[in-house]
Image: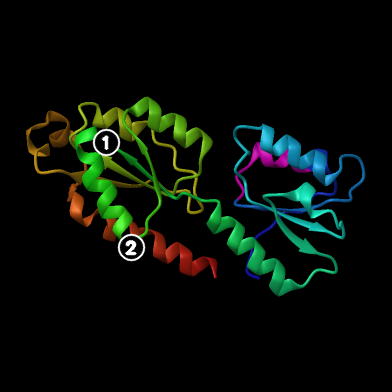
Amino acid sequence: MGVECEIVLDGEAALARLRSGEFDAMTLDVLMPGMSGFEVLRELRADERLAELPVVVVSVFSGREALSGEWVVSKPIDADELADALGAAVMAGRVRVLAVGRAGVRTHLNDTLEKLGIEHEWASTPLEAARLCASRRFEVALVDAGLPDVEAAIAGLDLRGRRLKRSIVIVSADDAEGFPGLARLDADPIPVDEAGAAVLALLEPAAAADL
């Protein structure tokens, strides 16, 4: 499957490892010694940092209503079915792009991204962006060069996506030239109209590597 993985043997060990590292997804057996898979799921979904982690449940359990909202693969495990479920769970659960900018740029940037089918979340301040980064795993951030505190916004970004790199794109609206923060950036802003293409160029190589 071309997937790097770590194996633990019980629920307590799984939760401890998830809380100490960075993972894209997990497979979870319902029947385990100690904590059951259901108990592990409850703890995961109650943990703000892990609540959105994609989980593929491996089970002979017939009562799937108890696993509503989770991806389920039945035993005996079929490798292709598991690979498909993992891939779908990871991609379905991930908003990979964070946009940070002024309200006046939001409509224009939203339109640009939505035309290309790029799902994203929006933050208007450095603090809001930092809070979103703490709870989500973004791979790319688009930052409005016209933010008065643009340097603080960039410094506070913690992108924890698969590549674990600071993939930050500075975008410039027509009126951004007059903002002092723009001149201090060690970057060449691109027009808002080109933001979608720039994001796709950053995401596509990672998507190909995951296949």
> Secondary structure under badge 1?
loop
Residue denoted by label 1:
101
Viewer-closest of 108 and 190: 108
Quadrant housing the N terminus: bottom right
Identify the residue at horizontal 68%, vertical 32% (top origin). 46
Graded by Cα atoms within 10 Å as few (under 14), some (14 to 19) or many (20 or more), the crowding at tag 1 reads many
Q: Position of residue 176 (x, y in %)?
A: 12, 38
| Marks 1 and 2, the one that precedes in the sequence | 1
Position of 9 with respect to 41 (left or right) is right
Tell me: residue 134, above or below residue 109.
above
Q: Position of residue 37 (x, y in %)?
A: 82, 46
Residue type of the residue flagged with mark 1: Gly
Residue type of the residue flagged with mark 2: Ala
- Magenta part, dominant SS: helix
Which numbered tag is attached to residue 201? Answer: 2
Q: Magenta region: which residues?
A: 14-23
The image's colour scheme reads rainbow
